[in-house]
Amino acid sequence: MFITKCSLHLKSFDLDVLKDSCALILKNKINLQNLKLTGPINLPTKIKKITVLRSPHIDKKSREQFEIRTYTKTIQIESLTKNTNDIINFMKQFENSFFFGLNIKVVFTYKKDVLL
């Protein structure tokens, strides 16, 4: 078995942090030639709205609304060769260089080598 594709799902409440981390990944891609990078692909922004009463005792009509926006992007990395170390070495570059407030989900896709 060897790794054929790696998907990075980046999620953050701050859009600037998300853009900076995507730029960091794209800037470091120049070093490796055996990888094909697709993205960043913008996914829909999730908006969660919360309504609370301004006063707990009176004035039920007086309310305040807050919202939390979650921004997501996906970057796909494909290996052009059967060497799985290319993707793993590329991921090790970012082990300590990502930003605070960024949620990263890494999904590897494996392909079984079948001999006929």
Image (cartoon, rainbow, N blue to C red):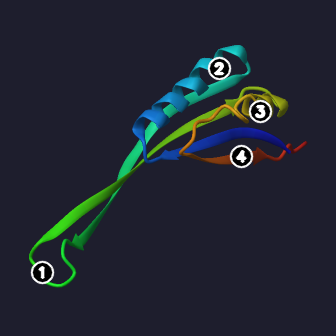
Quarter holding residue 57? bottom left
Identify the secondary structure beneath mark 4: strand
Q: State how far apart marks 2 and 4 are (Cα).
A: 20 Å
* Residue 39 place in picture, x, y as percent: 51, 31
Q: State how far apart marks 2 and 3 are (Cα).
A: 12 Å
- The disc at residue 92 is 3
Category of crowding for the residue at label 3, using alpha-carbon neighbours closer than 10 angstroms: few (below 14), some (14–19), many (at least 20): few
User: As displayed, is residue 42 above or below residue 54?
Assistant: above
Left or right: residue 23 versus residue 112 is left
- Of tags 4 and 3, the one toward the viewer is 3
The three-letter code of the residue at mark 1 reads Lys
The three-letter code of the residue at mark 4 reads Phe
**Residue indicated by mark 1:** 60
Q: How many marks?
A: 4
User: As displayed, is residue 37 above or below residue 107?
Assistant: above
**Residue indicated by mark 4:** 108
The three-letter code of the residue at mark 3 reads Lys
The three-letter code of the residue at mark 2 reads Asn
Q: State how far apart marks 1 and 3 are (Cα).
A: 54 Å
Quarter holding residue 90? top right
Q: State how far apart marks 4 and 1 are (Cα).
A: 51 Å
